[in-house]
């Protein structure tokens, strides 16, 4: 039954109501729900952006003396991070540490994401440094999330620094990472459309395919530089 719950939770269209129905049926089958059972139900609610119900299930498992584990907490933190709910991310992060549950790369990356979504880059960098101090090494998602944060403020220097750090650690940047770098150049105080376009043209040689986000940032850089003819040229190309 745990496998069945997990299948519903991980499907392309999670069905938390069916997950909960299965969990509620276990008693009549003389089966006892475990932390794995509850984690799948919580995950299904989180993936459906129904965080209040995820918290309700979380509270229920505690009432039943089924102790949440690192997966439980990380799932909830990731859900609140997607919504940019820093307060709840911080609350759960501190709670798990108080219970001697060690945060994982998923937990740290989610907390960083919540700060990035709220434009709180100083705190995002603090958490990034903390995880490294604890020998939890950033992955491509951690780096790309932080790069995207600096890109929003046009901080090209920090974006390039992190990109270089990724490469030095043999972490391959994704299209999301490069899109953020293009966006940083477009959002800087002095937009650099030539550099934006150079990065765009380099993607194919890196084995990456430009998408609408890539082109939009290049177009934005030309528009901000009042070079509408070139913006139109890039627009026509993407079409």
Image (cartoon, helix red, strand yellow):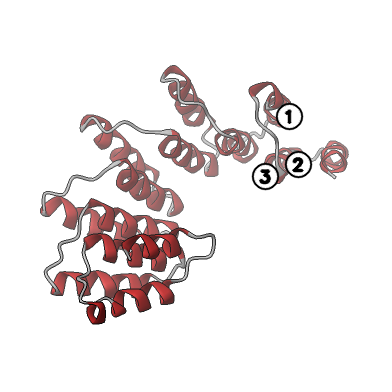
Pick the front one: 182 or 153: 182
Displayed quadrant of residue 141: top left
Per the image, label 1 sits on a secondary structure element best described as helix
Pick the front one: 154 or 182: 182
Which residue is label 1 attached to?
197
Sequence order check, earlier mark of 3 and 2: 3
Task: Give the residue furthest to the front.
Answer: 29
* C-beta proximity under 8 Å, tags 1 and 2: no
Residue found at x 29% / y 71%: 55
Asked if 222 appears above or below 198 in the picture, the reply is below
Sequence order check, earlier mark of 1 and 2: 1
Task: Give the residue furthest to the bottom.
Answer: 28
Residue 83 visible, this angle: no
**What mark, if any, has residue 235 been given in the picture?**
none
Which residue is label 2 attached to?
219
Give the class, few, some or many, for how many residues have Cα within 10 Å of label 3's Cα (few <14, many ≥20). some
Task: Give the residue furthest to the top.
Answer: 168
Pick the front one: 106 or 114: 106
Per the image, label 3 sits on a secondary structure element best described as helix
Displayed quadrant of residue 5: bottom left
For residue 166, side relative to residue 216 (left or right): left
Give the class, few, some or many, for how many residues have Cα within 10 Å of label 2's Cα (few <14, many ≥20). many
Pick the front one: 157 or 11: 11
For residue 48, side relative to residue 6 (left or right): right
Where's the C terminus, which quadrant?
Answer: top right
Give the class, few, some or many, for how many residues have Cα within 10 Å of label 1's Cα (few <14, many ≥20). some
* C-beta proximity under 8 Å, tags 3 and 2: no
Q: CA distance from mark 3 to mark 2?
A: 10 Å
- x and y percent of residue 96 in the render? 18, 54
Asked if 139 appears above or below 119 in the picture, the reply is above
Which residue is label 3 attached to?
213
């Amino acid at each position: 039954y745990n496998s069945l719950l997990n299948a519903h939770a991980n499907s392309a269209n999670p069905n938390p109501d069916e997950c909960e129905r299965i969990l509620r049926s276990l008693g009549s089958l003389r089966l006892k729900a475990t932390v794995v059972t509850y984690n799948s139900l919580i995950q299904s609610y989180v993936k459906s952006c129904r965080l209040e119900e995820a918290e309700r299930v979380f509270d229920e498992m505690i009432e039943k003396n089924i102790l949440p584990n690192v997966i439980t907490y990380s799932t909830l933190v990731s859900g609140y991070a997607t919504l940019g709910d820093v307060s709840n991310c911080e609350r759960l992060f501190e709670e798990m540490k108080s219970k001697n549950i060690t945060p994982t790369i998923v937990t740290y990356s989610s907390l960083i994401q919540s700060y990035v979504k709220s434009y709180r880059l100083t705190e995002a960098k603090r958490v990034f440094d903390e995880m490294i101090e604890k020998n939890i090494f950033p992955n491509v998602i951690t780096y790309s999330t932080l790069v995207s944060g600096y890109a929003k403020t046009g901080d090209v220097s920090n974006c390039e620094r992190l990109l270089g750090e990724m490469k030095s650690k043999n972490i391959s940047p994704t299209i999301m990472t490069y899109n953020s770098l293009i966006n940083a150049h477009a959002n800087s105080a002095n937009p650099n459309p030539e550099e934006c376009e150079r990065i765009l043209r380099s993607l194919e040689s890196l084995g990456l395919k430009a998408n609408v986000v890539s082109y939009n940032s290049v177009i934005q850089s030309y528009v901000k530089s009042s070079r509408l003819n070139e913006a139109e040229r890039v627009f026509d190309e993407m079409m």
